Amino acid sequence: MRVLEIDIETAPNIAYVWSLFDTHVPIDRVVAPGYTLCFAARWQGEREIIFRSVWDHGMKRMIDNAWTLLNNADMLVHYNGKKFDVPTLNREFVLQGLTPPSNYHEVDLYQVVKRRFRFASNKLDFVAQELGLGTKVRHKGMQMWREVLAGEPKAQRDMERYNKGDVKLLSSLYTRLQPWIPNHPNRGMWIEDPTSPVCRNCGSTDVKKDGTETRFTLRYQRYKCNDCGANLRSRFANKGERNANILV
């Protein structure tokens, strides 16, 4: 199973506004829409973090590289990527005249955090610090974006470190939250004819029986993964568990 951890950085929309307070900006005031500045990605289990940017590679090459990565991935891991990163990249693909990449599964850790926990903030930096995983790379804030857009090499290097840092943090968070991810794509499906039970979330075969689980009129064998800690159950009901006297 090829799992791609990915994060993108984008340029802001530029528009004329009459007020500095929250306001609706009509499209006729937009001077220039935002676009993807760079992305960082890593194949899970590998050391190298792939980085592509408009200033080093140009827009077309950067987007072609992103398309190839997504096309070869079985699963993406990202943070708020279903709402931001993936739709943004899809826009870049269609603008470049590319077709959709091959289908892939997605694990959006932002949605996992919102669904399973109640942290004071759901921001990646806050959650990672609460879990003792480290922090995002510190930078100048919006000033860094202004300097990147102005073509300043130091700011571009700072953004590369920031972008890569998010991927490292994303990877650590995924490992920590792995047993908490509901409906995780089943890694066992990428193992041909497994000879023992396989953990859906991490792919480990070090699982133990952990009682039974009852669903409506059927009872299933329950398992616990000794590696990631995920709760699992068998695909098929235990034999002899059907009871014709239980109505549905």
Image (cartoon, rainbow, N blue to C red):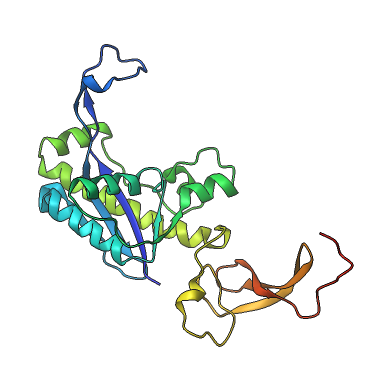
Residue at point 21%, 54% (across, down): 98
The percent coordinates of residue 39 (x first, y second) are: 25, 51
Side of 221 relative to 154 (left or right):
right
> Is residue 130 in view?
no
Q: Is residue 96 left or right of residue 105?
A: left
Residue 18 drawn above or below residue 188: above
Q: Nearer the viewer, residue 143 or 103?
A: 103
> Taking 232 as reference, is 117 above or below it?
above
**Is 230 in front, or is 185?**
185
User: The N terminus appears in which quarter of the rendering?
Assistant: bottom left
Point out the residue furthest to the bottom here.
195
* Quadrant occupied by the C terminus: bottom right
State the image coordinates of residue 2 (x, y, percent, origin top left): 37, 70
Which one is in front, 27 or 152?
Answer: 27
Which residue ends up furthest to the top in the rendered image? 18
State left or right for residue 100 relative to residue 169: left
- Position of residue 238 relative to residue 173, above or below, is below
Q: Residue furthest right?
A: 245
Q: Residue at x 21, y 36 (%)?
A: 145
Q: Residue at x 37, y 61 (%)?
A: 103
Is 2 displayed left or right of 189 in the figure?
Answer: left
Query: Residue 101 placed where, x, y %?
Result: 29, 59
- Relative to 212, does residue 27 appear above or below in the rendering? above
- Tell me if residue 78 can be seen: yes
Residue at image point 74% right, 77% down:
238
Q: Which quadrant of the figure has residue 52?
A: bottom left
Total of numbered circles in the picture? 0
Image location (x, y in percent) of residue 15: 22, 23
